[in-house]
Image (tube, rainbow, N blue to C red):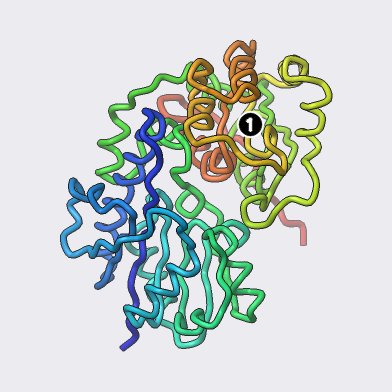
Amino acid sequence: MKRVAALIFHPPVGKSAPEQFVEGGRLAATQDMIAALRQAGTAEILLLTPEPSLLDGLDAGAVRPVQSPTHGFHFGETLQRLIREYRLDGFLYFGSGSGGLVSPRQLQRMVGFAGRSAPSGLFNNFYSCDFAAVSGAQSLLDLQLPSADNPLGFALADSGISCYALPRCLETQYDIDTPIDLLLLSASELGGPYLRRYVDDVPFEHPFIEPVLKLFTERSAHIALLGRVNPENWSRFEREVACRTSGLIEGRGMRAASLRVDPLLHQLLKENGIPNFFRLLANSADGAMLDTRPLLCGRGELPTPHDRFSSDLLLPDDVTDPVWRAFTEEALSSPIPILLGGHSLLSGGLHLISRACWKGRDLPRRLHPEPYSWQ
Protein backbone atom coordinates (compact mmCIF):
# COMPACT_ATOMS: atom_id res chain seq x y z
CA MET A 1 0.00 0.00 0.00
CA LYS A 2 1.32 3.45 -0.92
CA ARG A 3 2.32 5.67 1.98
CA VAL A 4 0.72 9.09 1.44
CA ALA A 5 0.90 11.91 4.00
CA ALA A 6 -0.36 15.47 4.18
CA LEU A 7 2.37 18.05 4.82
CA ILE A 8 1.31 21.45 6.17
CA PHE A 9 4.07 24.07 6.34
CA HIS A 10 3.38 26.93 8.75
CA PRO A 11 5.99 29.73 8.76
CA PRO A 12 5.27 32.21 11.58
CA VAL A 13 5.22 35.91 10.80
CA GLY A 14 6.04 38.89 13.02
CA LYS A 15 4.54 40.21 16.23
CA SER A 16 2.70 43.31 14.99
CA ALA A 17 -1.11 43.30 15.12
CA PRO A 18 -1.63 42.94 11.33
CA GLU A 19 0.88 40.07 11.16
CA GLN A 20 -0.67 38.32 14.14
CA PHE A 21 -4.09 38.71 12.54
CA VAL A 22 -2.86 36.88 9.43
CA GLU A 23 -1.12 34.20 11.47
CA GLY A 24 -4.24 33.55 13.54
CA GLY A 25 -6.23 33.17 10.34
CA ARG A 26 -3.73 30.69 8.94
CA LEU A 27 -3.85 28.62 12.12
CA ALA A 28 -7.66 28.62 12.06
CA ALA A 29 -7.61 27.55 8.41
CA THR A 30 -5.11 24.83 9.33
CA GLN A 31 -7.47 23.52 11.98
CA ASP A 32 -10.25 23.29 9.40
CA MET A 33 -7.82 21.65 6.97
CA ILE A 34 -6.85 19.01 9.54
CA ALA A 35 -10.53 18.16 10.13
CA ALA A 36 -11.16 17.94 6.38
CA LEU A 37 -8.09 15.76 5.83
CA ARG A 38 -9.23 13.34 8.51
CA GLN A 39 -12.69 13.21 6.95
CA ALA A 40 -11.01 12.48 3.62
CA GLY A 41 -9.27 9.49 5.18
CA THR A 42 -5.73 10.90 5.39
CA ALA A 43 -3.94 8.71 7.95
CA GLU A 44 -0.81 10.78 8.42
CA ILE A 45 -0.62 14.57 8.79
CA LEU A 46 2.66 16.37 9.47
CA LEU A 47 2.54 19.99 10.63
CA LEU A 48 5.87 21.72 10.20
CA THR A 49 6.79 24.98 11.95
CA PRO A 50 9.91 26.53 13.55
CA GLU A 51 7.85 27.38 16.65
CA PRO A 52 5.99 24.27 17.89
CA SER A 53 4.59 26.31 20.80
CA LEU A 54 2.24 27.93 18.28
CA LEU A 55 0.45 24.60 18.06
CA ASP A 56 -0.34 24.43 21.79
CA GLY A 57 -3.84 25.83 21.27
CA LEU A 58 -4.44 23.74 18.18
CA ASP A 59 -6.70 20.73 18.61
CA ALA A 60 -4.43 18.70 16.37
CA GLY A 61 -5.06 15.23 17.85
CA ALA A 62 -3.10 12.70 15.82
CA VAL A 63 -1.29 15.40 13.83
CA ARG A 64 2.46 15.11 14.20
CA PRO A 65 4.33 18.40 14.78
CA VAL A 66 7.70 18.64 13.03
CA GLN A 67 10.38 21.18 13.93
CA SER A 68 11.70 23.25 11.03
CA PRO A 69 14.79 25.49 11.13
CA THR A 70 14.34 28.90 12.71
CA HIS A 71 16.78 30.41 10.23
CA GLY A 72 17.90 29.43 6.73
CA PHE A 73 14.75 27.52 5.84
CA HIS A 74 14.90 25.88 2.39
CA PHE A 75 11.59 24.53 1.08
CA GLY A 76 13.02 21.93 -1.29
CA GLU A 77 15.55 20.51 1.14
CA THR A 78 12.93 20.31 3.88
CA LEU A 79 10.51 18.55 1.56
CA GLN A 80 13.17 16.01 0.57
CA ARG A 81 14.04 15.42 4.22
CA LEU A 82 10.42 14.58 5.04
CA ILE A 83 10.09 12.30 2.00
CA ARG A 84 13.24 10.46 3.04
CA GLU A 85 12.56 10.24 6.80
CA TYR A 86 8.93 9.16 6.46
CA ARG A 87 9.52 7.02 3.35
CA LEU A 88 6.69 8.71 1.49
CA ASP A 89 5.39 7.41 -1.82
CA GLY A 90 3.22 10.47 -2.27
CA PHE A 91 2.13 13.57 -0.41
CA LEU A 92 -0.27 16.48 -0.27
CA TYR A 93 1.49 19.77 0.39
CA PHE A 94 -0.20 22.88 1.82
CA GLY A 95 1.24 26.19 2.88
CA SER A 96 -0.78 27.10 5.97
CA GLY A 97 -3.65 29.34 4.93
CA SER A 98 -3.98 27.71 1.50
CA GLY A 99 -6.66 25.20 0.59
CA GLY A 100 -8.82 26.24 3.53
CA LEU A 101 -12.00 26.13 1.44
CA VAL A 102 -11.29 22.77 -0.24
CA SER A 103 -13.90 20.13 0.64
CA PRO A 104 -13.14 16.67 2.09
CA ARG A 105 -14.33 15.10 -1.18
CA GLN A 106 -11.91 17.24 -3.19
CA LEU A 107 -9.13 16.33 -0.77
CA GLN A 108 -10.00 12.67 -1.22
CA ARG A 109 -9.45 13.07 -4.97
CA MET A 110 -6.06 14.65 -4.28
CA VAL A 111 -5.09 11.78 -1.96
CA GLY A 112 -5.98 9.37 -4.75
CA PHE A 113 -3.77 11.33 -7.15
CA ALA A 114 -0.84 11.23 -4.68
CA GLY A 115 -1.19 7.44 -4.46
CA ARG A 116 -0.53 6.90 -8.15
CA SER A 117 2.55 4.93 -9.16
CA ALA A 118 4.01 7.23 -11.81
CA PRO A 119 5.68 10.46 -10.65
CA SER A 120 3.32 13.38 -11.27
CA GLY A 121 2.24 16.68 -9.75
CA LEU A 122 -1.17 18.34 -9.36
CA PHE A 123 -1.13 22.07 -8.54
CA ASN A 124 -3.65 24.67 -7.47
CA ASN A 125 -1.53 27.14 -9.47
CA PHE A 126 1.26 25.65 -11.56
CA TYR A 127 2.88 29.06 -12.00
CA SER A 128 2.90 29.91 -8.29
CA CYS A 129 2.15 26.90 -6.10
CA ASP A 130 0.23 27.27 -2.82
CA PHE A 131 -0.77 23.62 -2.50
CA ALA A 132 -0.21 20.46 -4.48
CA ALA A 133 -0.51 16.67 -4.64
CA VAL A 134 2.56 14.73 -5.77
CA SER A 135 2.89 11.01 -6.57
CA GLY A 136 6.11 9.04 -6.94
CA ALA A 137 7.66 11.16 -4.22
CA GLN A 138 10.89 9.17 -4.05
CA SER A 139 11.78 10.50 -7.51
CA LEU A 140 12.03 14.01 -6.02
CA LEU A 141 15.03 13.01 -3.91
CA ASP A 142 17.37 13.31 -6.90
CA LEU A 143 16.07 16.71 -8.06
CA GLN A 144 17.23 20.22 -7.27
CA LEU A 145 14.10 21.67 -5.69
CA PRO A 146 13.51 25.40 -5.13
CA SER A 147 14.04 27.27 -1.87
CA ALA A 148 10.38 28.39 -1.82
CA ASP A 149 7.18 26.60 -2.79
CA ASN A 150 6.03 28.92 -5.59
CA PRO A 151 8.19 27.47 -8.41
CA LEU A 152 7.73 23.80 -7.41
CA GLY A 153 5.70 23.13 -10.56
CA PHE A 154 8.47 24.48 -12.77
CA ALA A 155 11.05 22.30 -11.01
CA LEU A 156 9.01 19.14 -11.51
CA ALA A 157 8.07 19.91 -15.12
CA ASP A 158 11.65 20.81 -16.06
CA SER A 159 12.77 17.40 -14.74
CA GLY A 160 10.27 15.59 -16.99
CA ILE A 161 7.60 14.89 -14.38
CA SER A 162 4.03 15.19 -15.70
CA CYS A 163 2.20 18.13 -14.14
CA TYR A 164 -1.49 18.97 -13.99
CA ALA A 165 -3.51 21.96 -12.81
CA LEU A 166 -6.69 22.03 -10.74
CA PRO A 167 -9.56 24.19 -12.03
CA ARG A 168 -9.25 27.86 -11.13
CA CYS A 169 -12.09 28.45 -8.67
CA LEU A 170 -12.60 29.83 -5.19
CA GLU A 171 -11.55 26.58 -3.49
CA THR A 172 -8.23 26.34 -5.34
CA GLN A 173 -7.33 30.04 -5.53
CA TYR A 174 -8.20 31.32 -2.05
CA ASP A 175 -5.14 31.77 0.14
CA ILE A 176 -4.64 33.69 3.39
CA ASP A 177 -1.67 35.78 2.39
CA THR A 178 -2.62 39.25 3.66
CA PRO A 179 -5.19 40.80 6.04
CA ILE A 180 -7.47 41.74 3.16
CA ASP A 181 -7.99 38.02 2.43
CA LEU A 182 -9.50 37.59 5.88
CA LEU A 183 -11.60 40.77 5.69
CA LEU A 184 -13.13 39.61 2.39
CA LEU A 185 -13.81 36.18 3.87
CA SER A 186 -15.55 37.84 6.80
CA ALA A 187 -17.77 39.76 4.37
CA SER A 188 -18.62 36.59 2.45
CA GLU A 189 -19.63 34.42 5.45
CA LEU A 190 -17.81 31.47 3.89
CA GLY A 191 -15.21 29.18 5.47
CA GLY A 192 -14.99 26.24 7.85
CA PRO A 193 -16.09 26.43 11.48
CA TYR A 194 -12.72 27.41 12.97
CA LEU A 195 -12.05 30.06 10.34
CA ARG A 196 -15.58 31.43 10.57
CA ARG A 197 -15.30 31.86 14.32
CA TYR A 198 -11.99 33.64 13.81
CA VAL A 199 -13.20 36.14 11.20
CA ASP A 200 -16.47 36.80 13.01
CA ASP A 201 -14.47 39.03 15.36
CA VAL A 202 -12.22 41.07 13.05
CA PRO A 203 -10.03 43.57 14.96
CA PHE A 204 -9.71 45.95 11.97
CA GLU A 205 -12.14 48.15 10.07
CA HIS A 206 -11.66 48.84 6.38
CA PRO A 207 -13.46 51.90 4.96
CA PHE A 208 -13.69 50.66 1.37
CA ILE A 209 -14.73 47.00 1.44
CA GLU A 210 -18.48 47.60 1.49
CA PRO A 211 -18.37 50.46 -1.07
CA VAL A 212 -16.32 48.29 -3.45
CA LEU A 213 -18.63 45.28 -2.98
CA LYS A 214 -21.63 47.49 -3.78
CA LEU A 215 -20.01 48.72 -7.01
CA PHE A 216 -19.67 45.15 -8.26
CA THR A 217 -23.48 44.83 -8.27
CA GLU A 218 -24.07 47.99 -10.35
CA ARG A 219 -24.17 47.79 -14.14
CA SER A 220 -23.13 51.42 -14.52
CA ALA A 221 -19.97 51.02 -12.39
CA HIS A 222 -16.44 50.54 -13.71
CA ILE A 223 -13.74 48.80 -11.63
CA ALA A 224 -10.02 48.77 -12.46
CA LEU A 225 -7.94 45.66 -11.67
CA LEU A 226 -4.17 46.22 -11.61
CA GLY A 227 -1.51 43.59 -10.94
CA ARG A 228 -1.12 39.83 -11.20
CA VAL A 229 -4.51 38.97 -12.68
CA ASN A 230 -4.91 35.56 -14.29
CA PRO A 231 -7.01 35.92 -17.47
CA GLU A 232 -9.06 32.83 -16.64
CA ASN A 233 -9.92 34.19 -13.18
CA TRP A 234 -10.79 37.54 -14.71
CA SER A 235 -13.04 35.98 -17.35
CA ARG A 236 -14.97 33.97 -14.78
CA PHE A 237 -15.19 36.98 -12.45
CA GLU A 238 -16.76 39.15 -15.17
CA ARG A 239 -19.54 36.59 -15.63
CA GLU A 240 -20.42 36.78 -11.93
CA VAL A 241 -20.59 40.56 -11.35
CA ALA A 242 -22.74 43.30 -12.86
CA CYS A 243 -20.16 46.05 -13.33
CA ARG A 244 -17.67 46.61 -16.13
CA THR A 245 -14.03 45.88 -15.41
CA SER A 246 -10.78 46.90 -17.03
CA GLY A 247 -7.33 45.76 -16.08
CA LEU A 248 -3.62 45.90 -16.56
CA ILE A 249 -1.87 42.59 -15.93
CA GLU A 250 1.60 43.08 -14.46
CA GLY A 251 4.19 41.01 -12.62
CA ARG A 252 2.77 37.49 -13.05
CA GLY A 253 5.23 34.87 -11.83
CA MET A 254 7.37 37.40 -9.96
CA ARG A 255 7.66 35.05 -6.97
CA ALA A 256 8.25 31.90 -9.01
CA ALA A 257 10.84 33.50 -11.30
CA SER A 258 12.62 36.85 -11.18
CA LEU A 259 11.34 39.60 -13.44
CA ARG A 260 13.82 40.67 -16.12
CA VAL A 261 12.53 44.24 -16.30
CA ASP A 262 10.43 46.49 -14.10
CA PRO A 263 6.68 46.34 -14.83
CA LEU A 264 5.31 49.21 -16.92
CA LEU A 265 3.09 50.60 -14.15
CA HIS A 266 6.00 50.60 -11.73
CA GLN A 267 8.02 52.69 -14.17
CA LEU A 268 5.14 55.09 -14.80
CA LEU A 269 4.54 55.46 -11.08
CA LYS A 270 8.18 56.41 -10.53
CA GLU A 271 8.18 58.88 -13.43
CA ASN A 272 4.85 60.60 -12.73
CA GLY A 273 4.64 60.37 -8.93
CA ILE A 274 2.12 58.81 -6.59
CA PRO A 275 -0.40 61.71 -6.46
CA ASN A 276 -0.68 61.80 -10.25
CA PHE A 277 -1.18 58.04 -10.36
CA PHE A 278 -4.19 58.25 -8.05
CA ARG A 279 -5.57 61.32 -9.85
CA LEU A 280 -5.54 59.44 -13.16
CA LEU A 281 -6.98 56.31 -11.53
CA ALA A 282 -9.87 58.27 -10.00
CA ASN A 283 -10.57 59.90 -13.39
CA SER A 284 -10.78 56.53 -15.14
CA ALA A 285 -12.71 54.24 -12.75
CA ASP A 286 -15.33 54.20 -10.00
CA GLY A 287 -13.26 51.86 -7.84
CA ALA A 288 -10.08 49.81 -8.00
CA MET A 289 -8.29 46.71 -6.73
CA LEU A 290 -4.51 47.05 -6.70
CA ASP A 291 -1.86 44.38 -6.32
CA THR A 292 0.75 46.69 -4.78
CA ARG A 293 3.71 44.31 -4.84
CA PRO A 294 4.74 44.59 -8.53
CA LEU A 295 3.38 48.13 -8.68
CA LEU A 296 5.56 49.52 -5.89
CA CYS A 297 8.57 47.21 -5.93
CA GLY A 298 9.07 46.10 -9.52
CA ARG A 299 12.09 43.82 -9.44
CA GLY A 300 13.22 45.16 -6.06
CA GLU A 301 12.88 43.77 -2.57
CA LEU A 302 9.54 43.88 -0.79
CA PRO A 303 9.30 45.77 2.51
CA THR A 304 8.56 43.92 5.74
CA PRO A 305 5.26 42.04 6.14
CA HIS A 306 4.36 44.62 8.80
CA ASP A 307 4.60 47.45 6.25
CA ARG A 308 2.80 45.50 3.53
CA PHE A 309 -0.03 44.40 5.80
CA SER A 310 -0.43 47.86 7.37
CA SER A 311 -0.68 49.30 3.86
CA ASP A 312 -3.30 46.69 2.90
CA LEU A 313 -5.34 47.78 5.93
CA LEU A 314 -4.98 51.47 4.94
CA LEU A 315 -3.04 52.33 8.12
CA PRO A 316 -0.38 54.74 6.75
CA ASP A 317 0.79 55.88 10.20
CA ASP A 318 1.95 52.30 10.88
CA VAL A 319 3.94 52.01 7.62
CA THR A 320 7.67 52.76 8.03
CA ASP A 321 8.72 52.56 4.36
CA PRO A 322 8.32 56.13 3.02
CA VAL A 323 7.17 55.12 -0.48
CA TRP A 324 4.62 52.64 0.82
CA ARG A 325 3.43 55.16 3.44
CA ALA A 326 2.89 57.86 0.80
CA PHE A 327 1.09 55.40 -1.47
CA THR A 328 -1.18 54.26 1.39
CA GLU A 329 -2.00 57.86 2.33
CA GLU A 330 -3.07 58.61 -1.24
CA ALA A 331 -5.17 55.44 -1.42
CA LEU A 332 -6.90 56.30 1.85
CA SER A 333 -7.73 59.85 0.70
CA SER A 334 -8.77 58.81 -2.82
CA PRO A 335 -12.23 59.95 -3.98
CA ILE A 336 -12.93 56.39 -5.18
CA PRO A 337 -12.89 53.25 -3.00
CA ILE A 338 -9.68 51.24 -3.43
CA LEU A 339 -8.61 47.84 -2.12
CA LEU A 340 -4.88 47.19 -1.72
CA GLY A 341 -3.35 43.74 -1.39
CA GLY A 342 -1.09 41.13 -2.92
CA HIS A 343 -1.47 38.42 -5.54
CA SER A 344 -4.22 36.72 -3.54
CA LEU A 345 -6.46 39.80 -3.80
CA LEU A 346 -6.64 39.38 -7.58
CA SER A 347 -6.82 35.58 -7.61
CA GLY A 348 -8.87 33.99 -4.82
CA GLY A 349 -10.05 37.46 -3.85
CA LEU A 350 -11.89 37.87 -7.16
CA HIS A 351 -13.74 34.58 -6.67
CA LEU A 352 -14.60 35.55 -3.10
CA ILE A 353 -15.84 39.02 -4.07
CA SER A 354 -18.08 37.60 -6.80
CA ARG A 355 -19.96 35.78 -4.03
CA ALA A 356 -19.67 38.31 -1.21
CA CYS A 357 -20.94 41.25 -3.23
CA TRP A 358 -24.42 39.71 -3.63
CA LYS A 359 -24.91 38.95 0.07
CA GLY A 360 -28.02 40.80 1.21
CA ARG A 361 -28.65 42.21 -2.26
CA ASP A 362 -31.32 41.04 -4.68
CA LEU A 363 -30.48 40.01 -8.23
CA PRO A 364 -33.81 40.37 -10.09
CA ARG A 365 -32.34 39.79 -13.54
CA ARG A 366 -29.68 37.66 -15.17
CA LEU A 367 -26.29 39.32 -15.41
CA HIS A 368 -25.47 37.92 -18.83
CA PRO A 369 -27.39 36.19 -21.65
CA GLU A 370 -27.17 32.46 -22.18
CA PRO A 371 -24.77 31.41 -24.97
CA TYR A 372 -26.52 30.23 -28.16
CA SER A 373 -25.03 27.74 -30.59
CA TRP A 374 -26.02 28.07 -34.25
CA GLN A 375 -24.07 25.02 -35.41
Percent coordinates x, y for residue 112 in the rendering: 39, 76
Q: Which residue is drawn at 53% across and 59% down?
A: 148
Say if 301 sits above or below 118 in the image: above
Which secondary structure lies at badge 1? Answer: strand
Q: In this view, does 199 lie above or below 332?
A: below
Residue 21 location, x and y as percent? 36, 33
In the displayed image of the protein, which residue is found farthest to the front? 71
Crowd class of label 1 (few under 14; some 14 to 19; many from 20; radius 10 Å)? many
Q: Is residue 285 left or right of residue 261?
A: left
Figure disc tally? 1
Q: In this view, does 109 lie above or below 268?
A: below
Residue on which the image places disc 1: 290
The residue lying at 76 percent from left, 33 percent from top is: 266
Task: State the image quarter where residue 83 is shown.
Answer: bottom left
Return the residue nearer the eye: 103 or 143. Answer: 143
- Residue 302 lies left or right of residue 285; in this view the side is left
At 78% from the left and 42% from the top, the residue drawn is 262
User: Can you give x and y, in whole percent of width and height, for residue 42 in the image?
Assistant: 28, 70
Q: In which quarter of the image is the N terminus?
A: bottom left
Which residue is at the front of the view, 32 or 319? 319
Left or right of 47: which side holds 60?
A: left
Camera-side residue of 157 and 318: 318
Residue type for callout 1: Leu
The quarter of the image holding the C terminus is: bottom right
Q: Is residue 367 above or below residue 49?
A: above
Position of 183 with respect to 224 (left or right) is left
Location of residue 88 in the rendering, given as x and y in whole percent from the top left corner: 37, 80
